[in-house]
Amino acid sequence: MPKARSAAPLKTQAAAHHLLFGFALNVRQLRESESYRRLVLEQSSIAVAENAMKWSALRPAPDQYFFDDADFLVQFGEQNRIKLRGHNLCWHEQLPKWFDATANGANARTLLTEHIRTVAGRYAGRIHSWDVVNEAVEPRDGRPDGLRNSPWLRLIGETYLELAFRTARQADPTALLTYNDYDIEDESPYQAEKRAAVLRMLRRLKQRNVPIDAVGIQSHISAGTGHRYGASLQQFILSCREMDLEVFVTELDVDDRELPKQVAERDAGVAEAYRQYLDVVLREPNVRAVLTWGVDDAQSWLSGKRPRADGVPQRPLLWDAQFRPKKAVSAVEQAFVEARPAPAPAAGRSSRR
């Protein structure tokens, strides 16, 4: 069980073990809630926008960009010495309403490259890492290469992956370029198949000298007896290390639908899921950052998208709806403290970040 909570912020505990810790941020809350902002400043050394840098937020029209929220977040990070991750440059979801009627085989390459050049170029030198391509693998779509049958694949072909990464490197030579995905964490047969497909894709990109520096493991995990995280995930991270890829835990939270309704029991189960998961992930020194998908329980996407059968809100994060620390904070601290310390970063471009 988690030990007593330390007085040190999680960012301090993480830094002692060569890690960054932080949150996905809601820009409206960051602007309006003093409690929210205070907690972010106290606890985080890295952050990412929940939505402010996605296509749907940035592109109200094909020839228009809206940067107010993204600019605010980048300035907030710089003013407070919090590193920023960019999320994301190419995804099959949250595309603007105009996309389907506008994008076609003749203009899709231009749409993608101009978007990446404009967005990544605007923040060049100011972003720790970009999720360049998000969720490009889906074995259930039936392709031999395991790629998702996304709009980008249909309009451009599999070269869209290479196009996105090469364009991102040109637009921002200093950011760590990341492939980000979900359902690669547990020991189920489907997730084993997806892990293998992701590794095959990464090896293809590396063989073509595509500039990719890191892998984001989203880590939307679940509490309960049927969920195991262990040797297969650790081997996946080791395989990334062998390709000279850093690993970031990018969207960590714990689905509590299988736990009892009682708050104390749920919080204990969620805390144990955090500890067990991070005990596995943090064994490998190429894991460099841990971010939870949200700051407090009140704003978590899980209550809306994956509601509990009993109707009570999920409690998936480290702080509750009143910004009070939960048992999960101690569990994460414990995982940081017990993690194997990473060696000093090797010489090379990624060590600059």
Image (tube, grey):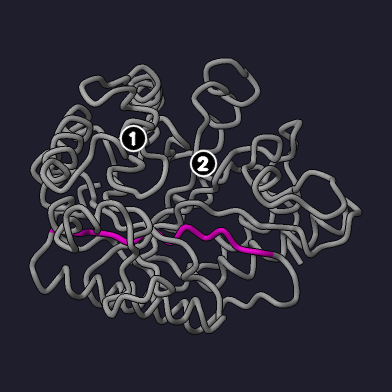
Question: Which label is found at residue 23?
Answer: 2
Q: Which residue lies furthest to the right in this view?
A: 262
Judge the density around disc 1: few (<14), some (14-19), many (≥20) Cα neighbours within 10 Å: many
Q: Give the range drawn in magenta.
A: 211-222
Q: In which quarter of the image is residue 62?
A: top left
Q: Evaluate whether residue 329 shows in this view.
A: no
Q: What residue type is labelled 2?
A: Phe
Q: Residue at position x 71%, y 65% from top?
A: 223
User: Foreground residue, 105 or 40?
Assistant: 105
Q: In which quarter of the image is residue 332?
A: bottom right
Q: Which amino acid does label 1 sit on?
A: Trp
Q: Answer whether residue 239 is magenta in the image.
A: no
User: Foreground residue, 298 or 17?
Assistant: 298
Q: Residue at position x 66%, y 38% from top?
A: 296
Which mark is in front, 1 or 2? 1
Q: Residue at position x 40%, y 33% from top?
A: 82
Residue 251 percent location from the top left of the image: 50, 51
Residue 79 percent location from the top left of the image: 37, 21
Residue 248 percent location from the top left of the image: 39, 57
Q: Name the residue under label 1.
A: 55
- Distance (Cα) linking label 1 and label 2: 20 Å
272 sits to left or right of 295: right
Q: In which quarter of the image is the N terminus?
A: bottom right
Please tell me whether residue 168 is drawn above or below residue 180 in the rendered image.
above
Question: Which label is found at residue 2?
Answer: none
Judge the density around disc 2: few (<14), some (14-19), many (≥20) Cα neighbours within 10 Å: many
Q: Evaluate whether residue 95 shows in this view.
A: yes
Q: Is mark 1 on a helix, strand or loop?
A: helix
User: Foreground residue, 82 or 5?
Assistant: 82
301 sits to left or right of 211: right
N-terminal label among 1 and 2: 2
Residue 321 percent location from the top left of the image: 74, 34
